């Protein structure tokens, strides 16, 4: 028996990193007795270690709660937890499309951030009702009135009734629950119409296969129903439907207005694409729900096992991750310096870091990664256009008519005192100023057009450090643009190291070449001979550094009690040597390959 | 050859670079019960070590000279009572300037101690202060003269280089001043910055700057040149002696001899049955005092590991090892096993192979870690 739609509320929570989204969700679950107190663990929804540690949500999750309102009725809440990072904008938009409302959490000490604003606009675009909530009122530096005014000025929605809460202490969270019923409308829909279920995320389960997280817009789905994925056209028979308590719990059916999961023995999440619409194979919906997009990787890097013998393990690990992450792509590549590995594509830098970290942690792999690259378009003199995601594959200059690089539009929100330094940063990164608006007297929204390849290095870190952590930013891909790009190569003791090659704008090539050479000089350990490090464009050397030869490497002391320890030290030194990559005659430590990234 | 090591884990103050097991400010409360525990441990091992004639005894620390001299004598008496000690045994005690007086030295002498090791470290008071030593060079010199006066004719002086506040000229001055004292033996160690020490933290937080690798190398070369010119022969990576005064106790380690270690954190290596066994005592003072005979770790060394250790240790000595000795110990030819790699090292100028001996060259000694890795792995 389907739950009365009038008593259902589907919503998500929008908040900037650290503004208290997951804590608020935890409190809600506590208050509605969704999770027994003994199972409470901070940040229930963020199940991955990385999510908990970094305080970010990577995968979407959902949870069903039952709330007894002051009107005496019991309401079903479906909270859809969304990722909170610019890399995952599309996933966020699909999660929001599954809701009728969004709880906007604003930190009373910080105000609105660019990320939050971007997501609020996404919510408004999806016609969601916004319920503002002011969090962290327990902190001495809290300025709730300020935050309320900011919400009204910037977003243009009334906020005088916003509950002032402390999710940490549980203050006023009850009021948030009450307002969810009052402010957020119940879902519309018709269970007698053909099935339309929106996939807002999918995960791979070892037993159930790829499981779609869905919001049913119209119709009903139950085990045994033959369904069709409208984007791929593939058909499957439903093995199980269920809801999130927050752990998955099978139910008889899912009907219009409800949120839950559908399992159908599907082999890969590539078949359960976020944003796709599920309908019935027979008498299905004519049209899919709007908004489906193929998620395309924007950032690429080479990932290699630190020890070549682990190539197969790395492939297995990537295959497993791809099962769960349709946005990740990988294909085999080889490097002279690094041997066999994979060129992997990611939605953005954070996505890349997360995948690397998961490979290392969950699969216990030691990796060498090369500096990230974007996709360049190369127009060859023979008229052919190629997409270039690996600098090593750049054709010789003589065969290139011109090259294009991806440009993004970046929105940076910052306290006005940092405008100067941030604009300087954007200029340094070849940015073109578009617009600047004052959100209020002390806060500014700056719009810049920036080359993506400048953003994927240290832009975010620079932005944070130059604004003491106050500026936030968001970007979207705008277009490809002709650009004077060159390939910067590095030679170690005369041998070219392909894994260090990178594509840069000509104006930046000299300074970059020098900086990377200096960095390499720092990270490459002294060896038994002198090592010249050279940066080159084409055949021309533009910078040179030298790693001096090591002249003394011996333990000063070794007596009876030291023998075991000294043996271990030698063992470690040998292991360290083994882990280094041999580029010609030079042993290069793994971190050197990322050094192109981390320069000042 | 066999030796006995006795660890006295007390100091007045911990030096900034020190990562040995040693407790500051505990001597007064614990010295007596600690030495009682040592005696119990001696009695425990006495029956097991019946067949050994020990050639050397080394009382190290910590600072053995901080505790009452009568306790040292007590322990040594017990050692002599329970173990066979050769009549011409080398019996050494480590001391620190500032903890010595005539009374102490004469009791040491009576107890049979015939070799003194004095931790001078530097002749530059600014450097001494920077590494947390409790004495000046003047005091160190006085301790040395006092020892001579008390009849010690086999004295080692420890010095260190690559220390904070130390320049090449400060270090050469130290070398010259030590040479002037004319001890029989000099140990010159380059600083090993050990994790967990005060100095490590100070370097990490940039409060202290150490000499560069190049400066260290110059100091190292200076040590060899100046000491050799003054008649000291380099017989191990960091050890120099006048003819006939090499430290027999330490040579025993480098020749893979057997040794019994007594006291907190002491290590032993003894061939109880056929295989070499190595064990260690607890590093915890309380635990040691309550159960001095208890082992903390115990391992049986495989033949492969024994070979590894033999090469690792004997190549610390400037004369390396005799190929016949290797064959006698391990019943195989070194060159059959490692010949190819040895040859590569020889070509590089790191290793010197004669018909009878295998030893590292000066360059090879400088790069001993690398040489071992290339040779043994």
Image (tube, rainbow, N blue to C red):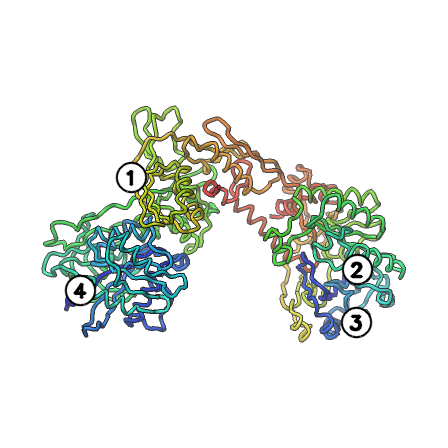
Are the numbered discs 1 and 3 placed on the same chain, yes or no? no
Q: In this view, does A146 lie to the left or right of B63?
A: left
Q: Position of residue A530 (x, y in %)?
A: 61, 35
Whole-number angstrom distance, CA of label 2 to CA of label 1? 75 Å
Q: Would you place residue A401 above or below residue A577 in this image?
A: above
Q: Which mark is residue B71?
A: 3
Residue B47 seen: no
Q: Are marks 2 and 1 in contact (CB under 8 Å)?
A: no
The span from disc 2 to disc 4 (Cα, nearest Å) is: 86 Å
Q: Distance between the residues labelled 3 and 2?
A: 19 Å
Near-viewer residue (B40 or A465):
A465
> Residues at marks 3 and 2, common chain?
yes
Residues at discs 2 and 4 both on one chain: no
Between disc 1 and disc 3, the foreground one is 1
Precedes in sequence: disc 3 or disc 2:
3
Tell me if B45 is positioned left or right of A243 in this view. right
Location of the N terminus of chain B (image quadrant): bottom right
- Is disc 1 placed on a helix, strand or loop? strand
Q: Position of residue A33 (x, y in %)?
A: 29, 72
- Find disc 1 in the rendering and name its residue: A478
Binning the other alpha carbons within 10 Å of mark 4 as few (below 14), some (14 to 19) or many (20 upward) gives: some
Secondary-structure class at tag 4: strand
Circle on res. A253: 4
Residue pointed to by mark 2: B97
How far across and down, in percent of the image, does residue A154 sit? 28, 52
Indicate the chain on which mark 4 is placed. A
């Amino acid at each position: 028996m389907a739950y009365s739609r009038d008593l259902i509320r589907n919503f998500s929570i929008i908040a900037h990193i650290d503004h208290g989204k997951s804590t608020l969700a935890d409190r809600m679950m506590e208050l509605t007795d969704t999770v027994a107190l003994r199972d409470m663990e901070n940040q229930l929804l963020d199940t991955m270690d990385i999510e908990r540690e970094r305080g970010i949500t990577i995968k979407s999750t959902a949870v069903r709660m039952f709330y007894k309102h002051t009107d005496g009725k019991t309401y079903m809440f479906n909270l859809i937890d969304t990722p909170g990072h610019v890399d995952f904008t599309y996933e966020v938009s699909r999660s929001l499309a599954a809701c009728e409302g969004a709880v906007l959490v604003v930190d009373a000490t910080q105000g609105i951030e660019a990320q939050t604003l971007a997501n609020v606009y996404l919510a408004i675009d999806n016609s969601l009702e916004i319920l503002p909530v002011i969090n962290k009122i327990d902190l001495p530096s809290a300025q709730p009135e300020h935050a309320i005014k900011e919400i009204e000025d910037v977003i243009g929605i009334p906020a005088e009734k916003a509950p002032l809460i402390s999710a940490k202490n549980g203050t006023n969270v009850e009021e948030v629950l009450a307002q969810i019923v009052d402010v957020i409308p119940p879902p519309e829909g018709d269970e007698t119409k053909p099935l339309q279920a929106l996939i807002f995320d999918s995960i791979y389960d070892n037993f159930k296969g790829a499981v779609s997280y869905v919001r049913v817009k119209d119709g009903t789905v139950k085990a045994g129903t033959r369904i069709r994925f409208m984007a791929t056209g593939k058909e499957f028979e439903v093995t199980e439907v269920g809801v999130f308590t927050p752990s998955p719990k099978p139910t008889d059916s899912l009907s219009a207005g409800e949120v839950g999961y559908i399992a159908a023995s599907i082999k890969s999440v590539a078949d359960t694409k976020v944003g796709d619409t599920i309908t019935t194979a027979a008498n299905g919906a004519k049209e899919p729900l709007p908004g489906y997009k193929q998620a395309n990787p924007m950032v690429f890097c080479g990932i290699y096992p630190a020890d070549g013998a682990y190539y197969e393990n790395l492939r297995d690990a990537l295959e497993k991750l791809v099962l769960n992450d349709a946005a990740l792509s990988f294909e085999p590549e080889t490097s002279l310096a690094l041997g066999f590995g994979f060129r992997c594509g990611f939605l953005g830098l954070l996505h890349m870091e997360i995948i690397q970290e998961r490979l290392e942690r969950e699969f216990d792999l030691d990796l060498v990664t090369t500096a990230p690259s974007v996709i360049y378009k190369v127009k060859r003199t023979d008229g052919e256009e190629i997409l270039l995601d690996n600098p090593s594959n750049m054709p010789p200059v003589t065969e290139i008519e011109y090259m294009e690089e991806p440009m993004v539009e970046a929105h940076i929100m910052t306290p006005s005192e940092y405008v100067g330094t941030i604009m300087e940063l954007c200029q340094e990164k070849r940015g073109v100023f578009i617009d600047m608006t004052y959100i209020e007297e002390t806060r500014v929204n700056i719009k810049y057009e920036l080359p993506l390849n400048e953003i994927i290095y240290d832009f975010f870190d620079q932005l944070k450090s130059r604004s003491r952590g106050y500026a936030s930013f968001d970007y979207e891909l705008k277009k490809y643009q002709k650009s004077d790009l060159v390939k910067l190569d590095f030679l170690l003791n005369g041998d070219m190291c392909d894994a260090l090659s990178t594509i840069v704008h000509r104006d930046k090539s000299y300074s970059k070449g020098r900086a990377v050479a200096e960095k390499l000089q720092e990270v490459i350990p002294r060896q038994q001979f002198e090592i010249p490090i050279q940066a080159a464009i084409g055949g021309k050397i533009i910078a040179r550094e030298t790693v001096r030869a090591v002249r003394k490497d011996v333990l000063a002391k070794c007596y009876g009690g030291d023998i075991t320890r000294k043996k271990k030290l030698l063992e470690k030194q040998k292991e360290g040597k083994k882990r280094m990559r041999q580029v010609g005659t030079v042993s290069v430590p793994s971190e050197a390959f990322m050094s192109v990234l981390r320069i000042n | 050859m066999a030796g006995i090591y006795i660890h006295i884990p007390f100091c007045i103050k911990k030096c900034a670079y020190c990562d040995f097991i040693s407790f500051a400010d505990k001597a007064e409360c614990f010295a007596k019960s600690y030495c009682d525990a040592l005696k119990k441990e001696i009695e425990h091992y006495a029956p097991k070590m019946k067949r050994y004639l020990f050639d050397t005894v080394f009382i190290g620390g910590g600072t053995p000279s901080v505790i009452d001299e009568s306790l040292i004598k007590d322990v040594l008496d017990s050692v002599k009572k329970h173990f066979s000690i050769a009549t011409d045994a080398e019996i050494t005690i480590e001391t620190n300037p500032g903890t010595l007086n005539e009374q102490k030295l004469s009791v040491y002498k009576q107890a049979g101690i015939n070799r003194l090791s004095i931790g001078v470290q530097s002749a530059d008071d600014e450097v001494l202060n920077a590494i947390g030593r409790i004495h000046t060079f003047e005091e160190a010199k006085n301790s040395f003269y006092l020892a001579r006066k008390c009849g010690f004719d086999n004295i080692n002086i420890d010095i260190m280089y690559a220390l904070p506040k130390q320049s090449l000229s400060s270090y050469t001055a130290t070398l010259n001043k030590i040479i002037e004292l004319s001890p029989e033996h000099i140990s010159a160690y380059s600083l090993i910055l050990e994790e967990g020490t005060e100095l490590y933290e100070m370097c990490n937080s940039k409060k202290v700057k150490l000499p560069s690798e190049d400066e260290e190398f110059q100091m190292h070369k200076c040590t060899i040149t100046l000491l050799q010119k003054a008649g000291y022969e380099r017989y191990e990576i960091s050890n120099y002696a006048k003819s006939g005064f090499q430290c027999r106790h330490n040579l025993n380690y480098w020749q893979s001899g057997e040794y019994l270690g007594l006291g907190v954190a002491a290590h032993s290596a003894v061939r109880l049955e056929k295989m070499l066994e190595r064990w260690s005592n607890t590093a915890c003072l309380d635990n040691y005092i309550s159960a001095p005979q208890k082992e903390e770790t115990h391992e049986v060394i495989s033949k492969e590991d024994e070979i590894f250790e033999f090469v690792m240790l004997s190549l610390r000595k400037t004369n390396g090892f005799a190929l016949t000795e290797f064959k006698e110990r391990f019943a195989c030819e070194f060159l059959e096993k490692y010949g190819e790699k040895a040859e590569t090292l020889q070509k590089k100028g790191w290793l010197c192979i004669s018909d009878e001996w295998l030893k590292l060259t000066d360059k090879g000694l400088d790069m001993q870690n690398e040489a071992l890795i290339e040779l043994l792995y």
